[in-house]
Image: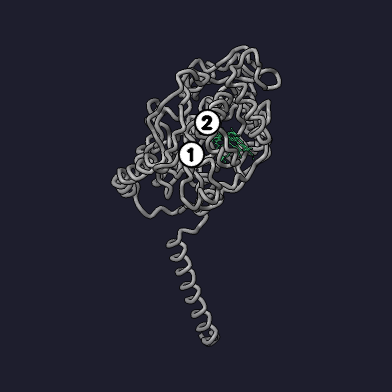
Amino acid sequence: MKNIKWPFVMVALSVFSTMLIIIETTDAEEMKTQKSSYSPVMITESFAAVRERDIAEKPEVINKHIALLKERYDLSGKTDPNTKMSGGKPVPAGPTAKLKSGMTWERLGAMSPAEIKQEGVFPYLPLPHVKHATGGMVVSPMQLKTHPELVRFDVEFDLPEAYLPEFPPPLFLINRPDLGDVSGGEEITINNYYEKMNGILTPFQLEGMRLLVTPVAQQQFNVTEDRKAEKAQLAVSCFTCHTNGHSSGVFHLNPDTRPQEARFRIDTPTLRGVNIQHFFGSKRALRSLMDFSEVESKTAYFDGDQVVAIKKGARQFTRADIAAMATMQNMFAFPPAPKLNVRGRLDPAKATESELRGENVFTMACASCHPAPYYTDNLAHDLQVERFYDGRAEGLIKTFALRGVKDSPPYLHDGRCLTLEDTVEFFNLIHELKLTASQKKDLVAFLKTL
Ligand code: HEC
Ligand code: HEC
């Protein structure tokens, strides 16, 4: 006791307590503004308590969101009787975006971006998630019929089925175009992939396919207390969202932005034709399919949070695993486009007058970013959409390939354009093209031939 230096102890104690106060207030501040990049790891409420609150809040959450959609869109589900997706589902018809009262598409097209912004009449505002504060994957109703385990108790899918890809979609292989659709009209899962693909794929491709259809834990569907499904489960495979190598319309929030409210809704893109693409992700621009496949197991699965990924049981892939997955994805072909020639341009002997006129408009107005044969420049562009509305800039987005585009509603990274007619109206405004009504019709006719 004689050796204790009391003044030193007193100073040390007061420094320590000041530190505690600082740590405490920092924590409290962070909780208040929710500015942390990380999801909480320590769950302080029971599953039952969270579930009960989520269920109680659900009707209000859904009603508010549906009211917003109805204000923005005509959701009557009209389709084009003459154009089918590759598997036979009718292509939805638009434009679905509602204009402010008294406004017409012609008048809107004649206004400058600044005028449109000032009057608050831009019809294509960013689409929010049904429950943006929670986010996470939401599965389409047609998928829930065969996968009731993927029902979330806190949210529901928002867009009508007419504006989604067909389920299940056909699967075309670049190495066996002679076979056409190899899915047999069924969803390829862990239970049937071997029987369907053995004898068509190489052993290494089959191994890639096995990994793509193997269900594992995911942020909302797992075994922990903060899951959003009734039952603890390991239920999500790459093909849950990229069904048959295409898309089932599952949406979630992009994993590459924080805080939560700044994240974008993202619609699952198709994996058809990834072999011709130079980078992956609408914003992230990973250069190889192998890298993206590995990253997806932390992003699509755990919101890009590797801490939670470890807790909830993320898959750890070997380099050989991701090479097999990438090899398989590289086999997913664009659907047939019988009116295109070997250069990816319309064959005049097969195309209609309207489609040919549409190709001309497209060549003038769109082809600089969407050149044939696959209709992508493999770059990202900043369309500066914020010129048209009060809100945050979206920045660079990848130019999606337009080959097979009629199979992939809804359009744009967040799905805010429900039909091809809407994309034409959108780009007419973005590029201030002042297209006539008949030019727009021809352009849509052309897009449907791709
Ligand atoms: C929860 C749904 C979901 C799951 C599960 C999922 N993905 Fe994705 N995938 C998406 C979304 C959404 C995007 C768009 C991401 C973006 O815009 O950055 C995407 C993008 C991709 C892309 C890039 C496509 C492009 O055109 O740039 C590839 C490749 C891909 N996913 C592969 C996979 C693989 C492999 C798996 C399984 C390990 C997987 N995905 C699991 C939803 C999912
Ligand atoms: C400056 C380059 C550029 C030009 C010019 C351009 N686009 Fe695009 N296009 C893009 C980008 C970037 C995206 C992705 C935007 C997003 O997701 O927010 C896109 C997306 C699309 C999509 C949606 C694809 C999908 O799968 O979701 C369609 C359809 C489309 N463009 C059609 C057109 C048409 C028609 C024109 C001409 C009237 C046109 N584009 C002109 C860059 C361009």
Residue depicted at 34% across the width and 45% down the height: 64
Q: Residue 437 carries which label?
A: 2
* Amino acid type assigned to the residue bearing label 2 in the image: Ala
Q: Residue 416 carries which label?
A: 1
The secondary element bearing badge 2 is classed as helix
Q: Where is residue 142 in the image (x, y as percent from the top left)?
A: 40, 27
Asked if one can make out residue 127 in the rendered structure from this viewpoint, the answer is yes
Left or right? Give the position of 171 relative to 135: right
Q: Which quadrant of the figure has residue 427?
A: top right
Circle 1 crowding by C-alpha within 10 Å: few under 14, some 14–19, many from 20 = many
Decide which of 364, 389 is in the foreground and name it.
364
From what the image shows, is residue 216 above or below residue 175? Answer: below
Ligand 2 has an atom within 8 Å of the beta carbon of the residue at disc 1: no
Decide which of 22, 285 is in the foreground and name it.
285
Q: How many marks?
A: 2
Residue located farthest toward the right when viewing the structure as drawn = 343
The residues tagged by marks 2 and 1 sit, at their Cα atoms, a distance apart of 21 Å
Please name which of the two marks, 2 or 1, marks the residue nearer to the observer.
Answer: 2
